[in-house]
Amino acid sequence: MMSSLSPALVPILGAILVPFLRGRLRDIWMLALPVVGLVWLLNLPDGNHGQFTYLGLELTPVRVDAWSRVFAIIFFIAAFVSVIYALHVREWMQQVAGLVYAGAGVGAVLSGDFVTTFVYWELMMVGSLCLIWASKTKAAFRASMRYLTMHLISGVLLLAGATAWYLVHGSVAFGDIGFAAITEWWNTGERSLEAAAVSLLFMALAIKCVFPLLYNWVQDAYPEATVTGAVFLSVFTTKLAVYSLARGFAGEEVLIYIGALMAAIPVFYAVMEDNLRRVLAYSLNTQLGFMVVGIGIGTELALNGTAAHAFSHILYKSLLFMGMGAVLFRAGTVNASDLGGLYKSMPWTAGFCLVGAASASAFPLFSAFVSKSLILSAAAYGGYLWIWLMLLFASAAVCLHTGLKLPYFAFFARDPGLRCEEAPTNMLVAMAITAALCVGVGSFPSALYAILPYDIDYKPYTAAHVLSQLQLLMFVALAFTVLLWTRVYPQELRATNLDTDRFYRRFVRRPADGLVSGFAVVIRDVCTLGMAFARSFSAQVAAWFSRDGFLTAERNTNIMVTLVSATLLSFLLLFYGIFDL
């Protein structure tokens, strides 16, 4: 019986009790939920569980295999440390939203059909929106509306694509999709419902996976979330998209070039950005590009690299968001132009951020070193020289803006005299656990490699690999130092950097405003007519029930019998009509 239920239900249903618990009991309960869910997951055998038929659809709420297991494991680990990080928050809405969001992410990863995926997909949207709204600022509300718009579009595309897929195949099972139908349509020119289904499903994932021109909702919304909410947000939505893309479109070559652009484009914005949480959001886009390249290459080495890099990226990115969240919590800002010298006030936070920065830079003995190299090696072995060079450039840029810029300007740049307390104990504990995992995965990669989807015989710690990576990192550090010393490095300014979303937000906003205004006029007129009708009807009813009204005036027995009979006949006809008796 237990194997037929999804481990995702543990945090989702457990979140219902959070508002009714207080103090230490609430903390223990929230910490126990991801632990119990993880233990439940680890005891589930591989295979499909809990299958049932609903409205003629064969649904698979739990599918456990090598792919879903590795993502579900890291999701539960991330949920656990995120809950620790948020223990100082007393607002139950944030705590419930975080648990529901994390649980829905696990549920979507474990689901084996489009319908179940869609349900969890939308539940994730609700939970993540609450984490943004909880900031209670105008900027957060506006960003959340744009975030909501993008995710609603993605959800509609997923539902439409799943419907079309069912009409073609008679099944809603979520497996390999591929571009074969689109290729056939392109070659023959014949319209195909299957090609439409594939296109809709791919676009739904493209939005979630922040493809070029579709990525701005991450930089828009994540920095506006609460201190703790941004940590949750950095983990689940985009990694679920990576997982889904690997499930449905592994080996599609176009993803190689899309991923390379994803890795390269955001680095320029990250270098110029003043808000350090937004820098991390751009860096997140870059790392997703590496994963998409791995999916596109499609070899076992590349797909293992995608899964491994998703695992390690969740660890070090959440650690960096924790560090910047602690700075925001204590200093009140994460703008590089306002910070500097905080290592004196927050030495532990600074140390943990350095671990995250080293991991993001793929420094030897840290997590990304043993995961990113799988994708780079797969690109090199596959003969994709230019893609390999673009990924190498992106790696150097990540070292520049995440590995060097972020910790330097937050903790070691000129001291503006800002003094604050160290981060709360629960934040430090969460960062310590995550930092230890970053070092552990990087130092002992065999544990990570053992849970990857395919058997792997890869040794990251060869002399050539270590030396070449150290050379890259040292030259980037030297360039950063020289640029700072010569004052050539772009000055950190509190400014808005226009991104690609500026174009569609500008050109779509005016027609959208006109459409909304038109709907508002229609709704206003309908409401006016409705109110007028309601007033007229209420006046008529009052007249019927007045002293000499139709329903209160004295009637003879024949008239009353006729009225009662007509009423009973009406009810009988209505009853038989509804139930078709």
Image (spheres, rainbow, N blue to C red):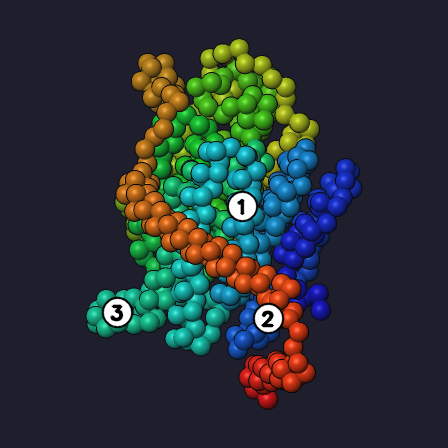
Number of numbered discs:
3
Sequence-first disc among 1 and 2: 1
Q: Is residue 180 left or right of residue 47?
A: left
- Nearest to the observer: residue 219 or residue 452: 219
Observer-side mark, 1 or 3, equals 1
- Nearest to the observer: residue 176 or residue 551: 551
Image point (39%, 49%), residue name: 520
Is any atom of residue 312 visible in this view? no
Observer-side mark, 3 or 2, equals 2
Query: Element under label 2?
Result: loop
Residue at mark 2? 550
Amino acid found under the numbered disc labelled 3: Trp
Residue at mark 3? 185
Q: Quadrant of residue 226?
A: top right
Q: Quadrant of the N terminus?
A: bottom right
Above or below, 401 against 259 in this view is above
Q: CA distance from mark 1 to mark 2?
A: 57 Å
Image point (34%, 62%), residue name: 199
- Nearest to the observer: residue 291 or residue 61: 61
Above or below, 197 against 356 in this view is below
Above or below, 76 against 472 in this view is below
- Nearest to the observer: residue 57 or residue 273: 57
